[in-house]
Image (spheres, rainbow, N blue to C red):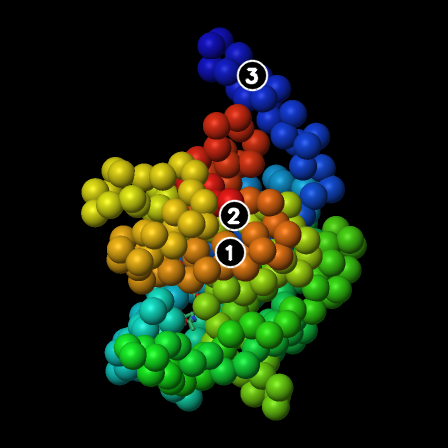
Amino acid sequence: MQDAIDKAAALVEAHKYIRRFEGKTVVVKVGGSIMDEPATLDSLIQDICFMDAVGMRPVLVHGGGKGITEAMKQAGLEAQFVQGRRYTDERTLAIAEHVLVRDINAGIVKRIRELEHKSMGLNSLGSCVTFARRLFLEGDAGRRVDIGYVGEIESINGELVQALVDAQHIPVIAPIARDPSGGKLNVNADSVAGHVAAAVGAEKLVLVSDTHGIRLSEDVNDLASHLTKAQIEELVSKGIISAGMLPKVEASFIALEGGVAKTHIIDGRIPHSLLLEVYTEKGIGTEIVL
Ligand SMILES: Nc1ncnc2c1ncn2[C@@H]1O[C@H](COP(=O)(O)OP(=O)(O)O)[C@@H](O)[C@H]1O
Ligand SMILES: CC(=O)N[C@@H](CCC(=O)OP(=O)(O)O)C(=O)O
């Protein structure tokens, strides 16, 4: 009996948030780090469909870094990352596009449709909404570091994303962008999500990864529940925020500076982490504000 009462109480608690977020857009970015277990990704897709069912307007941006690394290995290539971005030569770009668009993007759209929600894949092989220029990173002593066919977002076709959202479709966006000459560039998926969130004026940006949140030290249990931009900049300068977390905090700043109220980094391995973040009092993970 207590079990049933707890479930009813959870619904009542959720009701307040369902009302608050009705009609509001939330951009959810799902990382390759949680795609190892098909059940984990499937549970997240179900959470997104739940949000859609209760009137929130989810937009999904996905990565797939682990899958790309695996496919590269099978092709005899070794993955290299610089400041959280993959060194991308021509072969790597072709592999990344195959994994991200043909496998992951198509698979997510198919699953959403199986759950009887409307969805549309926005990717480099169809309707592309991401436009980028070559990204050159800053190395030691101001040196320019060329990491190949990697892009930084220049613009997003927010109108197309918004039109789909208004037509009750869940847009699913892959991180291969077009460059001004019609070529393709590999963009970090967190960066895409940050720009998309700003372009559609999202209420929230939620980055779903394989960490409980941002660590404040080497201790994995030393986690922050709330951080400001200034606090994050200090953690970056001390090297505590590094590797794959760097594009996440940069994407959070882009979203926040673009008008998004809050961004969140949550652990997708926790069942229904997305619903816990959005529809409960306490939330989970690390919340970032300006
Ligand atoms: N301060 C930090 N707190 C948490 N994770 C961090 C931190 N600094 C670096 N990381 C790393 O960032 C990783 C998340 O980035 P990444 O592996 O690219 O995930 P995703 O595939 O979800 O985008 C974590 O698993 C962790 O290893
Ligand atoms: C330039 C760059 O690094 N692109 C990423 C795109 C995929 C991605 O971002 O996937 P995750 O979200 O799983 O990390 C890559 O090739 O891994």
Separation (CA) of disc 1 from disc 3 = 35 Å
Residue identifier under label 3: 9
Q: For label 3, count other residues whose C-alpha is less than 10 Å away and answer few (under 14), some (14-19) or many (20+).
A: few
Q: Residue at x 68, y 57 (%)?
A: 200
Evaluate if marks 1 and 3 touch, with contact meaning CB atoms under 8 Å apart. no
Q: Could you tell me residue 188's position as x and y percent?
A: 46, 68
Q: Residue at x 40, y 36 (%)?
A: 225
Q: Does dot 1 land on a helix, a strand or a loop?
A: helix
Residue identifier under label 2: 290
Residue identifier under label 1: 253
- Determine the residue located farthest toward the left in the rendered image: 218
Q: Is residue 86 left or right of residue 201?
A: left
- Quarter holding residue 118: bottom right
Q: Is residue 122 visible?
A: yes
Instruction: Answer above or below: position of 159 versus 53.
Output: below
- Quarter holding residue 82: bottom left
Question: Which sits in the foreground, 134 or 92?
Answer: 134
Say which amino acid is labelled 3: Ala
Q: Could you tell me residue 290's position as x and y percent?
A: 52, 48
User: On residue 82, which mark appears?
Assistant: none
Q: For label 2, count other residues whose C-alpha is less than 10 Å away and answer few (under 14), some (14-19) or many (20+).
A: some
Q: Residue at x 46, y 79 (%)?
A: 135
Q: Could you tell me residue 77's position as x and y percent?
A: 28, 81
Q: Is residue 190 left or right of residue 70?
A: right
Say which amino acid is labelled 2: Leu
Q: Does dot 2 land on a helix, a strand or a loop?
A: loop
Say which amino acid is labelled 1: Phe
